[in-house]
Amino acid sequence: MKTLPSLLFALIAGVLLAAPLSAEEENESVTITWSNTDKYRDVRSTTGGPIHELKQFKPAIEREVQKYVKRQFPEGTQLTMDIVDVDLAGRVDFARAQEIRVIKSIYPPAMTFSFTLSDAEGNVLAEDDKKRISDVGFLFGHQNPVHRDRYEYETEMVRDWLRSLKRETKI
């Protein structure tokens, strides 16, 4: 009979701990769409093709944008993005009977998208129909040859853009 209260306590604790994580993951202030993904410049994977790469890349970028907007922008801020092109850092080359992504400074990450940033009242703070961001200095400051994040160059590029967007809009 002692196991029932223990089990009930564990169940309630699990639900209470999981609830904030679900709320954090769902950020209604950010909407990201991915258009014409078959036309993206470079989302080629060394392991499974462009569809496989996009399945991993999209959540990484969406998570980064949602996290940044939630922490750095005022509550109620709305950011809508439509990503129309992606060029991952590096280039896929064929070497030693396998494809590898070669990271060199001449192959910087880049993205093209449209966006609208609005405040809680719906006033448009910033917008662009064809914003292109790139990070030609993406290798500077990266001393560790073992990278923790597969898309660290792209996520850092997006964070830099969000920081500049916040400065430009003065929010």
Image (cartoon, helix red, strand yellow):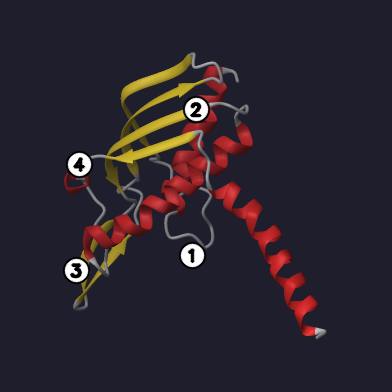
Q: Earlier in the sequence, mark 3 or mark 2?
A: 2
Tell me the crowding category of disc 3: few under 14, some 14 to 19, or many 20 or more residues within 10 angstroms, Cα based. few
Residue under pointer 3: 94
Residue under pointer 4: 36
Tell me the crowding category of disc 1: few under 14, some 14 to 19, or many 20 or more residues within 10 angstroms, Cα based. few
Which sits in the foreground, 147 or 20? Answer: 20
Q: Earlier in the sequence, mark 4 or mark 1?
A: 4
- Tag nearer the camera, 3 or 2: 2
| Disc 4 element | loop
Tell me the crowding category of disc 4: few under 14, some 14 to 19, or many 20 or more residues within 10 angstroms, Cα based. few
Q: Position of 159 compared to 73: left or right?
A: left
In the image, what residue occupies the spot 37% across and 33% down?
81
Q: Which mark is residue 78?
A: 2
In the image, what residue occupies the spot 37% across and 51% down?
58
Amino acid carrying label 1: it is Pro
Amino acid carrying label 2: it is Gln
Would you say the residues marked 2 and 4 are in contact, meaning their CB atoms lie under 8 Å apart? no
Q: Position of 110 compared to 121: left or right?
A: left
Amino acid carrying label 3: it is Phe
Q: Earlier in the sequence, mark 3 or mark 1?
A: 3
